[in-house]
Each structure stands twice: as C-alpha cells, then as structure tokens.
Amino acid sequence: MMARMSDVVQSVLAGIDGVRGWQEALYKDLHQHPELPHQEHRTAAKVADRLRTSGCEVHEGMGGTGVVGILRNGDGPRILLRADMDALPVREATGLAYASTHVTDEGTPVMHACGHDMHVTALLGATDLLAASRQQWSGTLISLFQPAEEVGDGAQGMVDDGLREVLGGVDVAMAQHVLPLPAGQIGTCPGPFLSAADSMRITVHGRGSHGSMPQASVDPVVLAAMIVIRLQTVVAREVAPAETAVLTVGSVQAGSRSNVIPDHATLLLNVRTYDEQVRMHVLEAIERIVRAECAASGSPKDPEFELYDRYSLTDNDEATTALVAAAFADHFGERAVRIPKHSASEDFSDLPNAFGAPYTYWGIGGIDPDAYRVAEAAGRIAQDIPTNHSAVFAPVIQPTLDTGTSALVVAALAHLGRG
Ligand SMILES: [Zn+2]
Ligand SMILES: [Zn+2]
C-alpha cells in the first residue's frame, strides 16, 4: 500500500534533529570563510566531503569549482536541486560572533551578504535526509552546487563543462533563495519571478577640440546627454503598460577638463525585463536610438556596443510551481505564501534550460520575525530591514535553516516516486 505523501514527508523530516547540529556548525564555518565567484575551493571541498558522507556519487571541479552529488535510487524522475556557493566583495558589518573578517590577498573584503552559505547548508542537509530514507522514495536526486552566481556565469560554466554528459537528463529542477521576509516564511510565485538582466557598455565618438572652439568639434558630451534623455522614452513609449521593464543609465563618462571637448563618451546601462520579446525590443531600441543620435550629431565613427553581466529570465513553470506550492501549503500551513515577482536576477535557469526541463524557484525568509513585525507596524520595512548584498544582511540561523532544509525535502518528495 502506498504511504500518504504527508506521512512520507514526516518520516523523512523526522531525521532533521539529527542533522541540525552539523548544519549550524557548517553554516557558521562557511559564513566565516566566504569565497568570491570562481574561488569557491574551500567551500566546494566541504560540500564534496559532506556529499560523500551522505553516500552520494560525487563529481567535483565542474565548471571550475562546481560540485554535483547524485543519489540513484531506482525508477522515477530525475530531480535537480541547486545551491550557489559564492560570496560578495562586501565588508561585513553585522557584528555577529561568526562574522567574516576575510580579506583577499588583493585587499578585497569578502562576505556572504546574499545568503548563499544558507543555501549550501540547507541543500546538504536535505540531501542527507533523503539519502538516509531511500526506502521512502524512488528516482534520482541530483544535488548541484554551482560557483559564481553573483557574476552570472557559474551555472552556464557547469553546462559547458559537460554537465549534460554527467547527468544524462533532468526532469525537473528547483532552487531557493533567502530573501528579506520573516524567517520561517516560504514564498512561491508562478510564471516570471526574477527578471532577465543585461548590462551594456556603449562608446560614442565625437571630435575633440578646444573648449573655446565648439565649431571644430563633434561634442560627445552633448551627444551622450541626448542619448540619456531619449533612452527614457524606451520604457515610457515603446513598452506596453502591462509589461514591466527597467532601463537605467548607471554611468556616463566623458572628458576630464572644463576647456577640452573630449573625443568620446562611454555609457553603462542596465536593463531588466520579464519577457524575452520585451527584452529583445528594449535592446534593439537602445541600439536604434544610439545610432540615430550619433547620426544627428554627425559622429565621425560608428558607436560600439558591448553586452555583459547577462542573466536569463527566471520563469517558473506553472504546473511545477503549483505542485510545489500545494506541498508547501500542506507542510508549512500559513507560513507558505505567494510572493510577487522581484527585479533581481539569477543564473539558475541556465541549468534547467540546458536540459529543456521545467523548474521552479522560491524564496525563504531570513529576517528575525519580531524585528520584521516591528518594522512592518512602523511602515519602515524598506528603511529598517536589510536587503541581500547589504553589509548588515544577516539571516537568523533558525528557523531559516530548518525551513530551507524542509522546503527542499518537501519539494523533492512532491516529485519523486514513493518507495
Ligand atoms: Zn546576490
Ligand atoms: Zn544570491
């Protein structure tokens, strides 16, 4: 007779008291030893050790420091769970006993300011719990730890390094992120959840001259100014009101003296979109406007465009998200909530996209619930609750860690066959 799903979840999660101790110690250790993107050597070694202890088939060094643990457990779907391992060049100011004081040889301070240490620890715990209760499920569990999420190329790096050959296939993929929500809460969102992001470096050319002789110049400062103003019409006039897009000019640089007209200007742009067609339209509109303004100014040379720091859209599959959200509601009760889309970006979707697999990505709260309630009552959430990447972003270890661990187990069991 088949066990009821909630009984299976209860029975697998009964082991959580046994993993919490090493998880909390590991979390503090990882937090104190953060590593920048592509430098996650120490973290990767700890991950691989723990996966081996849990009985996984372990693949290391994928796409640099990526690690994959595989539990093959009979017929059933191949489920990929993913955590990211990298930290940020931020000087920690949380004042925690286990705060990072790490500074690289080049003098860059490093901090787990985005909670990736929490993701790693939760996924290792969930993997261990599922490994210890194989008789309760069947299928293949793939626990993947990627480098370099913060620079957007860690997931693709693992794909390019033969991930498809190692895994064969993936039927569904899932991941989670600590967010500035009350700890214990878990939030799902069907459809587009995190924006696609594109950064663009644009160089426009003029003709330099003495500041007193503008007639001899093609002034790139004026040209850049016209571009900045005209770019404001892209979202306002070319994107439908029901769509969402953000176009920010974050940097304009030209010249260095008051009496010299420079010969070029450089603009750095950031674009966020939630729809591939809107994304393409916005990128094309930028190029069209820049070329037209260059022509209007009589620019002597074509402008140059370089796209960098690009993140794919995170577009949660409706059916997968519905299945997982129902399992969360069943297990977490009112702590399971629906959350709106975010304008942040992620490279997680590069993994399922490489396999043509559906996916869902959810958020877990990391903020002390009492502090959150106080800020909420005062209408000061934006001012008082630190966000990811802040030097004072410090998830409370519990119930954040238990919630993240349980969420992965619940979501995996919602897909895996029953033993
Ligand atoms: Zn981040
Ligand atoms: Zn992050």
Image (tube, helix red, strand yellow):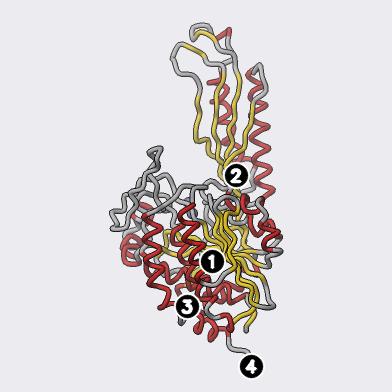
| Label whose residue precedes the other's in the sequence (4 or 1) | 4
- Give, as a three-letter code, the residue at label 3: Gly
Tell me the CA gap for discs 4 and 3.
Answer: 27 Å
Q: Is mark 4 on a helix, strand or loop?
A: loop
* Circles 2 and 1 in contact, beta carbons < 8 Å: no
- Mark toward the viewer: 4 or 1: 4
- In this image, 52 relative to 305: left or right? left
The picture places residue 397, in percent across and down from the top left corner, at: 37, 65
Task: Look at 49% across and 10% down and name the residue there.
Answer: 211
Task: Look at 48% across and 12% down and name the residue there.
Answer: 260
Tell me the CA gap for discs 4 and 2.
Answer: 49 Å
Q: Is mark 3 on a helix, strand or loop?
A: helix
| Label whose residue precedes the other's in the sequence (2 or 3) | 2
Q: Nearer the viewer, residue 120 or 199?
A: 120
- Which class describes the residues within 10 Å of circle 3: few (<14), some (14-19), or many (20+)? few
Q: Residue 188 got which mark?
A: 1
Residue 18 versus residue 339 in the image, above or below: below
| Label whose residue precedes the other's in the sequence (2 or 1) | 1
Q: Nearer the viewer, residue 334 or 302?
A: 302
* Circles 4 and 2 in contact, beta carbons < 8 Å: no
- Give, as a three-letter code, the residue at label 2: Arg
Q: Residue furthest bottom?
A: 1
| Label whose residue precedes the other's in the sequence (4 or 2) | 4
Q: Does the residue labelled 2 lie within 8 Å of ligand 1?
A: no
Q: Is mark 1 on a helix, strand or loop?
A: strand
Q: Name the residue under label 3.
A: 333
Q: Does the residue labelled 3 lie within 8 Å of ligand 2?
A: no
Q: Residue 60 got which mark?
A: none
Q: Residue 310 got which mark?
A: 2
- Mark toward the viewer: 2 or 3: 2
